[in-house]
Image (cartoon, grey):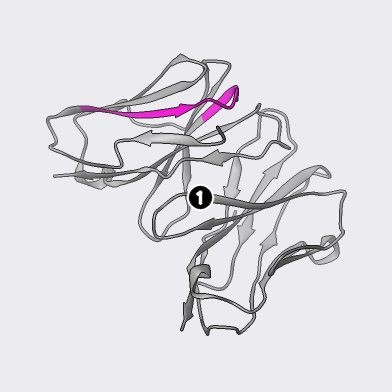
Amino acid sequence: AQKVTQAQTEISVVEKEDVTLDCVYETRDTTYYLFWYKQPPSGELVFLIRRNSFDEQNEISGRYSWNFQKSTSSFNFTITASQVVDSAVYFCALSEGRSNDYKLSFGAGTTVTVRA
Amino acid sequence: DTEVTQTPKHLVMGMTNKKSLKCEQHMGHRAMYWYKQKAKKPPELMFVYSYEKLSINESVPSRFSPECPNSSLLNLHLHALQPEDSALYLCASSPGTAIDYGYTFGSGTRLTVV
């Protein structure tokens, strides 16, 4: 069963528009971590944020913001005033708290294209 | 140094060749990982090394052979690969294997098997 669902395959916006990426996760654990990674065309996975299951505070970092809602098992990511350099594939990932299971379960990814 | 360095960046090999991918980190991380990523797909875990010992093998075919010579180095030896093994191979490291550690990824090796 898919543990992390990113329903949006591709999103295309014009520069300066806001874009929100959806992430829905599934776990039976009470302790888990959620991540967002950015993968530009160069291939490297760039860490953006880590959030643990006990911290539901939303977070803002520059133009990036994250909305974590345990009630809906969602961890959505918003880019405000998008720029061309934001064009990349964005992955949401889950790490669960079961013993010996520290693997990252990735969503399918959302390709964001920002047009000038 | 906060990077994971992978070499080579690109590799083209024949199905009868033997080659190796190299991954290096100097952050003192004790867990290192190999992931395989096909085009337009998320990364898939292949191997996990914890304190230089292989702790996870995700049922990877024996034509892929990992090696961890020391805490900073991780190799992936390739032999008799198939064209379907063409992919981006990503190395990652983390301070440990507890779930709360973040992962640092390298930029990958783009492998093409001809």
Name the residue rendered at 60%, 53% in the picture.
Answer: A1
Q: Nearer the viewer, residue A55 or B54?
A: A55
- Chain ID, mark 1: A
> Where are the magenta residues, as a range?
B19-32
Q: Secondary structure at mark 1?
A: loop
Name the residue rendered at 76%, 44% in the picture.
Answer: A32
Name the residue rendered at 66%, 65% in the picture.
Answer: A23
- Assess whether residue B26 is covered by the magenta stretch: yes
Which quadrant of the structure image shows residue A21? Answer: bottom right
Residue B85 in the image, given as x and y percentages of width and height: 27, 43
Q: Nearer the viewer, residue A86 or B98?
A: A86
The image shows a total of numbered marks equal to: 1
- Name which residue type carries label 1: Leu
Q: Is residue A75 above or below residue A104?
A: below
**For mark 1, what is the residue?**
A45
Residue A50 in the image, given as x and y percentages of width and height: 71, 49
Q: Is residue B78 above or below residue B106?
A: above
